[in-house]
Amino acid sequence: MAQPPDDCLARNEWICGEYLTTRRGILLDAVVQHLQLTGVSVLIALALAVPLALAARRWRWAAGPVLGLTTVLYAIPSLAMFSLLLPVYGLSAALVIAGLVLYSLTLLVRNILAGLRSVPEETRQAARGMGYGPLRLLLAVELPLALPAAMAGLRIATVSAVSLVTIGAIVGHGGLGNLIYSGMNTYFKAQVLTASALCVLIAVIADLLLLGAQRLATPWARAGAT
């Protein structure tokens, strides 16, 4: 009679090389889905946050409603948010993306607006004195100077999105969250630990990449710090 295999999978150990080799394809698909959901959500949120922050900076009466609405959206629990969006998007990846976009808006709008408001008024006046029109002033002076604060918000929003994607497992579109939840239901230790570690790794790498991009895009900030 053949003996059952005696390896880390059979022993259900937390750290198991056999799991990595035998589930490589499953892990890769989950990582790709995780990255796609995170990337698309943050990019859409950024595309919405920039005009909202500009409107809040341009018209003071708009700042209160914009910041208040995004704050209320951020305060909604994730399960309740998905339930509210379910009639619109159904059980789809779009449901997860829509929820992540709404959660990211608060962080992005507040940081972009704070960056725009931090631009010294004398800098704006100097640019106008040099013949800068409103659009050129915004693109060449205000947005570059607001970049450090905006990038700080983008980094937080991205790391938060990496974490929140896992909640999408409740509708079957959670990337690595699918593996975490199924592993918890079956007490599959190696799957839970590996998927969780990959989530952390993605968040750390994304944050480091954005930090590097920020340092490259704002050389004056490094010069000022030295």
Image: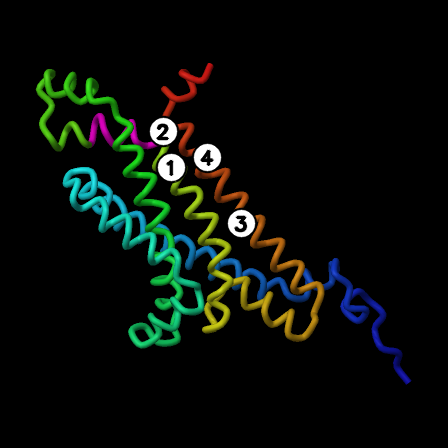
For the residues labelled 4 and 1, the Cα–Cα distance comes to 8 Å
Foreground residue among 39 and 50? 50
Residue on which the image places disc 3: 202
Q: Is residue 162 above or below residue 13?
A: above
For the residues labelled 4 and 2, the Cα–Cα distance comes to 10 Å
Foreground residue among 103 and 19? 103
Res 19 label: none
Left or right for 205, reference 89: right
Q: Is residue 155 above or below residue 186?
A: above
Q: Nearer the viewer, mark 4 or mark 1?
A: 1
Q: Residue at x 44, y 54 (%)?
A: 161
Left or right for 144, reference 148: left
Q: Amino acid at mark 4?
A: Leu
Q: Nearer the viewer, mark 1 or mark 3?
A: 1
Residue 36 pos. (x, y %): 42, 57
For the residues labelled 3 and 2, the Cα–Cα distance comes to 22 Å
Residue 26 pos. (x, y %): 58, 66
Q: Amino acid at mark 3?
A: Ile
Q: Residue furthest right?
A: 1
Residue on which the image places disc 2: 217
Res 151 label: 1
Q: Residues within 10 Å of mark 4 (few under 14, many from 20)?
A: some
Name the secondary structure under disc 4: helix
Res 211 label: 4
Name the secondary structure under disc 2: helix
Overall secondary structure of the magenta stretch?
helix
The answer to whether mark 4 and mark 1 are in CB contact below 8 A is no
Q: Which residues are magenta?
A: 139-147
**Mark 2 or mark 1: whose residue is earlier in sequence:** 1
Name the secondary structure under disc 1: helix
The answer to whether mark 2 and mark 1 are in CB contact below 8 A is yes
Left or right for 146, reference 17: left
